[in-house]
Image (spheres, grey):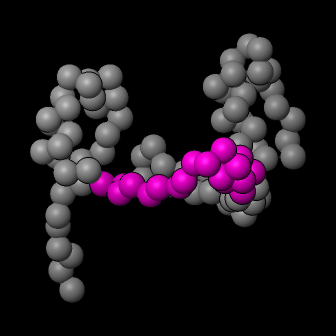
Amino acid sequence: MSTLTTTREKDYSQWYNDLVLKGGLADYSAVRGCMVIKPYGYGLWENMRDVLDRMFKETGHQNAYFPLFVPKSLFEAEEKNAEGFAKECAVVTHYRLKT
């Protein structure tokens, strides 16, 4: 692994990004704001998920899965609550590819 030039204390965000990229845990994808999680990164995620899953179940909690996509009408109904992160949302529109 390459040496990290930015320290955690100096710029945590840059240090974290350098760690993930230089450590081979993930890489940027062709889609802005998205990353490809590589095998070592995915292995770490699986370990964290398993530990958290056991902790949740030990305390009587249950897992739930929510859809990735939210209809625009529901998002607009919560407009004032969504104001802070609206710029981070991607809007997906339907487009049929020509074959």
The correct choice, above or below, for 8 with respect to 67 in the image is above
Please name the residue shown 74% across and 13% down the image.
10
Please name the residue shown 12% across and 45% down the image.
73
Q: Nearer the viewer, residue 19 or 62?
A: 62
Q: Residue furthest bottom?
A: 99
Q: Answer yes or no: is residue 25 visible.
A: no
Q: Nearer the viewer, residue 87 or 6?
A: 87
Task: Measuring from the top left, give residue 25's x and y in whole percent.
Answer: 72, 51
To which quarter of the image does residue 17 belong?
Answer: top right
The correct choice, above or below, for 3 with respect to 56 in the image is above
Task: Measuring from the top left, give residue 60's x and y in whole percent.
Answer: 61, 48
Q: Is 86 displayed left or right of 21 in the figure?
A: left
To which quarter of the image does residue 8 belong?
Answer: top right
Please name the residue shown 21% across and 76% down the image.
97
The quarter of the image holding the C terminus is bottom left
Please name the residue shown 69% across and 18% down the image.
11
Query: What's the magenta region?
Result: 49-69
Q: Answer yes or no: is residue 36 visible.
A: yes
Instruction: Report the label total.
Output: 0
Q: Nearer the viewer, residue 26 or 57?
A: 57
The correct choice, above or below, for 49 with respect to 88 in the image is below
Q: Is 50 displayed left or right of 78 in the figure?
A: right
